[in-house]
Structure formats: structure tokens, C-alpha cells
Amino acid sequence: MTIKGLRKVAISLGALGLLALPLAACGGGGGGGGGVVTPPPPPPPPPPPPPPPPPATIPSANSSEYLRNYGVGNTGAIAAWQTGATGRGVTVGVVDSGIKLDHQDLAVNISPLSTDVIYGRNQPQGPDTHGTSVSGVIAAAFNNYGTVGVAYNATILSIRADVSNCSDPKETVCFYGSDLARALDYAVANGAKIINLSLGGEGPLGAAFENALGRAINAGVVFAVASGNEAGTNPEWPGRYASDPRFAGGIIVTGAHDNANQIAGFSNRAGVSQTYFLSAPGVQIYTDCEGNSCWIANGTSFASPAVAGALALLLEAFPNLTGKQAVDILLRTGRDAGDTGTDVIYGRGLLDIAKAFQPVGTTSSPQATGRAVQVAIEPGAYVGGPFGDAMGRTDALGTIGYDEYERLFRIDMGAAYRIAPRRSYQPENPTPMRQSQVTMDGPGGAKLSLVAAVPVETPEPILNRYTPFDAPWLGDEVKQEALFDVTAGRMSFAAWQGRGGSRSPFRTGSGDGFAALAQADHAVRGAMVFDGLGFGPLTLSAETGAGDRRAPLRSVEQDVSSYARAALDWRGEHGGLSFSMGALDEKMGPLGAYMPTRSDFAMPSRTRFAAFGGDLSLGRGVVLSGEAGFGRTEIEGRFLNLSSAAVSSTWRMALQSDCPSWALGCSRLTWEISQPLRIESGTFSAFLADVPLEYFDPVTFSERRFSASPSGRQIDFSVRSLHPLPGGSMLQLEAVASRDEQHRAGAPTGYALLGSWRRGF
């Protein structure tokens, strides 16, 4: 094998500073004359210099030591360092051309067991720097000098196995299979968990090497092997052993890419070994820094040690892993490049240590009941708006989870409970509707009405028929509704069903804010009017409804919310009063939450609510109105519950008047201030696993409690005007300002300007 692709450059490695301190000087003299001269008092000692800042615990992403070699950042190693993984305690065997034992940037990480396996030579430090440069990519020390290795606290077991008497006269350094076999056996016997082979050739290495390779893999050792620098369509040997069933899962063969994540022109491709192939930085790699210079290296020889370092980080951070599991994790978490999925160029993709340090597969958190909770961030899931940021501002839901490989992670269960989306000010779907109504009179003044509404048939546009106001996840559903209404004397009964976003006609009166959370698509209502009481008509009504829930790219959650409400309404000559009470049942989560029912994060809940409201005519077209509502919510979650019920409130006050003469044709003007539904009190509780001090400590559990109330209180201010236009059309304009949006203290004030135009035909 020819060593090439190395050149040395001068670099600035920083300057040394000296701290100057004053020195005390002594002097003497004599003389006649009388008297004794008293010397002046000595000046006060200078204050001590400030203590130096404490050394950084991990390399800074802005330090020259880190930035000098882009390859370290490209691998995502800093994500592992931030968890405390640095390779400490993991021995990496480097079978190569030896190592400089007193190297300025490596000596602290070189094992004293480093050796030379060539009989009769005993020179672990050879004349060639290739092995030293390879080792620097793995474990150059974090010492504010030179560069830093991927696993900068790993131990390098250097095993020199090169010879110079090569069969090819063009080769200056080569390796024989029998020597490599002894090197592998030595590495296994002396505690190596990973072996890096930055070497290769055109053919298999023979039975002795293959037997040693099998012994090593059976002993739990895994390999990072360079793919070769011949721009071939397949890796060289021994890299190609990765696809040999005898060694499957024990080898990662590594190609090289540049800082633009493009495969290097010289790098052998994945080819037949694509299932076990990763690419790592191998172009213009700074390594082997001493004095004021470093080597710039090119080749897959300097890509495979990045993979070896990544394996060391995994094995330190997750001591339960086997070597093959660590290999599998790196392959599964490779960053896709080239053709989608596994391909013949990049194999499984680019080395991505940051992703490898995230849970892989299904993650579960142990529970005291013995039943694990499946941890998954559901796309589009959120808590009910009244909770605001209550979930996101607590650390009480910190616990542990185990991924598919039984790796232990610290997780925040609260991350699954995202804050509800901001209120949408979009107008309802402006699709023109055609309404048909049939009314039949019966005996005794009874009346039967049937009303159906469907969209007006219009030609299909060339572009997608959805407007910006449609929700594409409603599929092919169009807005349709039907209402059946029977009135007999003082009694009435109505049944309604809608689809495609139709809104229940019963959503009026006090308590509507709670009933609306059910998002009913079918409802029934019965009412009785009591008149002739001397103080105006009194209406007693009861209604119930239920609905499905929809979200983008999710299956429909059927009949997951329902409500029932009873109301008492009174109308007088100058105003009216209303009172209602009811219950809201939600299988997904409380107060409008969207947590899929199959998820362990679902929080089935029941809310009992009451509301009252009224309006009063003050004369001259001025009407004052207001309402308030209160709820009490209980939750039966799979791991998160309310130890004390959540109490919520909402209120609104409005003043409506005729428009002044300067209001540009306005007929009515409404000023309104309101508070959306908000949790006022309540305590969440969860019995969760504690984060252990040590990896294999037994699991303990504790109860966590935190407030269900958000940090802020949203207050909405709005002004609304109505403008009749010629031809019977109507223009409505509205301006809204929201303080502490989504009940988040300090949230920027939100503003909205709305306009809508309607005309009946």
C-alpha cells in the first residue's frame, strides 16, 4: 500500500503570554553627618491577579482547536461531547505504520502496550507518519493545541505491522496478511474494543487474516476499515469483508467525502458493500500537529478513524451496547446522501454522530406500574389552548427512556405536549352555498322545516380547487349540512348534521366557548318556551353533540369529543339574560387538545362547565353585553394526571353602537375586550422514573407535580364595523390586538386586520 495524500503546512497555534510581577530590590549605603533617615513606608502590595478562567470541559465549537479540522464538526461529534462522551476508557487498536510515542498532541492517549508485531524489529515508532496521522483523527488530545480528535480521551493501542520489502517496487510501505493476523490477535488480547484498518489492497488477505478477523469479531471487537483511494466502484480488501456473511455486522467500511458532503474523487464507492458502508470526512483533514505545523491529509485512511472514534464514543456513553449494536446504530443513523436510501455510492450515508446519540426506533419510559410508556412526538399534537405554556416551562417531566437498543437516555416528556397553535383569524370557507328549505304546517300550529345547504356547482378550476381557506386534510369532503326542525306550540326539536367544516347552528348563547371545543359535526336540540309570565319569555333548552377530529396527514379520530348542555334564556324589553351548564368529554385531551387516542400521551378528560351572560340596551342604539364561563376539568391520563382539578375561566365584554357620522358609511360599531379560556388553577402530577447517577443504577420513581396554569393571560382588544353596500352586500372590517398571546407572559403583542364581504343571491 502506498502512503500518499499528505503534505505539511505551517499554522498559527497561538502565542504564550508571560505574567510580569514586580520584584523587591535591596540597597545600602553609609555616610557621616548626624541623624538617622527613616525610610518612607513601603507601598502597599499590588492586588493579586484575577484567577484564570476555569478550563473548558469540552472543546468549544468556536475554538481554533475545533475549527482547524472541519471534519470533526462535520461528523457531529460535539453532540456526543455535550453528553459527556469523549471516548474515555475505550481502547482503539490502530493497526498501521506505528506512532510517535512522545507526540505533542497524542502522547497522553497512547497506550504503553503499543507494539510492533514484526518479528525481531520491536520498533513501535516507525519512520512513516501515516499511523500517527490516523491516530490523531481518533484521539488528538483536547489541550488547546493543534486539533482535537473525534474521541479525544480514547486510548490508542498502536500496533505497527508495516514492512518495506514489498513485492511491488512502487510500494514503499505494505502489509502482509499473516502480520495483520498477529496484530488483530494482539489487539483483542490487550483490550481493544475497536480496530481501525486504514490500509487496503486488490485481493483477499488469506486464511490467517480471515481467521483472526473472525476471532476478533466473535470476541466482540468491531472494525472501521478504509475503502481505498482508487476511485473504484467497490471497496478494496479488507474493507470488502464487510459484506462477507461470516463477518456481517462487525465491520464498517468507510469512504471519504469533502466539506461539501460530496464523495471524494479518489474514494472507492460503496458498491457490493453498500449495506455496511458509511462516508466520513477525508479531504483536506488537518492532523498530526507538532510545533507550529500540521499535516493536511487526503484519503479514506483519514475517514475510517472518524468512524472508529464514533464507535468509541458510543461504547463509552452506552456501556450496555455490544460492538455490533454500535455498528448497527451508526449505519442506521447515517445522513442520507446521493440516491434516497442505501445506494452504491454512499452506502448508508454520511457519518452522523449527533443522530447516533438520539434514540433509535421505539423509545419507552418505565413506569412504576410495570407498564412502559411509548415515547413518541406525535406530528401535529398539542395541548389545549387554555393551558398555554404550562407544559413547556417545567422540568418536572424529566425522566429516562430506553430506545430499541436498551440505551438509557434522559428525556423530557413535556416536549410531547406542544403549545396549541395560535388562533386563526381566517374567515370561514367563502364557498358560495345553495340552501334549500321546505316548510310544512301541521295541525295545532305545528311546523316542520327541512333545510339543506350544499356548495354552488362551479366549473373545476385548472389549478387545485382548494382555496387558502380550505383544510386540505379534509380530503374530498365538501361543506354540506342538513337541519331538521319541528315546532309544535311552545316546544321545538332540531337535529343537525354537517361535514367539511360546517358549524353547528346551536353554537349560540352562554357556554358556547366550551361546547365549541367538541367541534361537533352532528347535534340535536330540544327547547320549550314559557310565555305569559309577566316578565318576558323564558326558554329552557337542552342539546348534545359529538364530533370527529382531523389533522394534517393523520387518520380521522372518530367521535372523540362530545358535549351536553342545558340552558335557560330570558328576553325582556331592553335586554336578556342567559345561564347554561353542561359537560364536555374529550378522549384526546382536555379543552381542545389534539393527542391521538392511540398515543400514551393522550389525556382523556371530562370538563363540567357553567356560564352566564346578558345584554342591555342603553338607548340610542347602544347595547352593552357580556358573558363569563367557568370550567372544572379532570384527567385520566396514562401517566399524567391532575392531582387537583384544573379550574378555567373565560369572559367577554362588548359595547355596540350606531356609527358616528365620520365612520365612512358604517352602520354598526362594536368595541370588545375578552379573555380566551385560561386555566386558573390546578396541579398536574406524574409518577416517573428518576434519572440515575450512574448508568446501571437501579430504577427509582418519584412523584412530580407542577402547576397547570400558564405564565401569562391573553387579553384581546377588538373593534368591528359593519358597512352596508349597494346591491344588498355587506362589508365587515375588524382590527384585533392580543396581549400575551397563547397565555405566554411576555409574548409579543399580536395584531390582526380582517375584512370580509358577503352578498346573498
Image (spheres, rainbow, N blue to C red):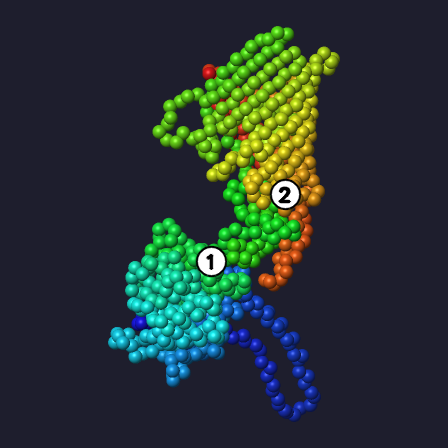
User: Alpha carbon of mark 2 to alpha carbon of mark 1: how far?
Assistant: 33 Å
The answer to whether residue 303 shows anywhere in this view is: no
* Image point (54%, 31%), residue name: 735
Q: Residues within 10 Å of mark 1 (few under 14, many from 20)?
A: many
- Residue displayed at 29% across by 77% down: 166
Place of residue 447 in the rendered image (x, y in percent of width and height, measured from the top left)? 59, 11
Q: Residue furthest left?
A: 169
- Three-letter amino acid code at disc 2? Gly
In the displayed structure, would residue 506 be above or below residue 22?
above
Residue at numbered disc 1: 329
Figure check: 291 above or below 369:
below
Mark with earlier residue (2, 1): 1
Q: Categorize mark 2 by other alpha carbons within 10 Å: few (<14), some (14-19), many (20+).
A: some
Q: Position of residue 520 (x, y in %)?
A: 57, 29
Name the mark on residue 272: none
Q: Return the residue nearer the eye: 695 or 436.
A: 695
At horizontal 59% and vertical 36% (from top left) the residue drawn is 592
Residue linked to disc 2: 637
Disc 2, SS: loop
Question: Disc 2 vs disc 1: Cβ atoms closer than 8 Å?
Answer: no
Which residue is situated farthest in the top direction here?
443
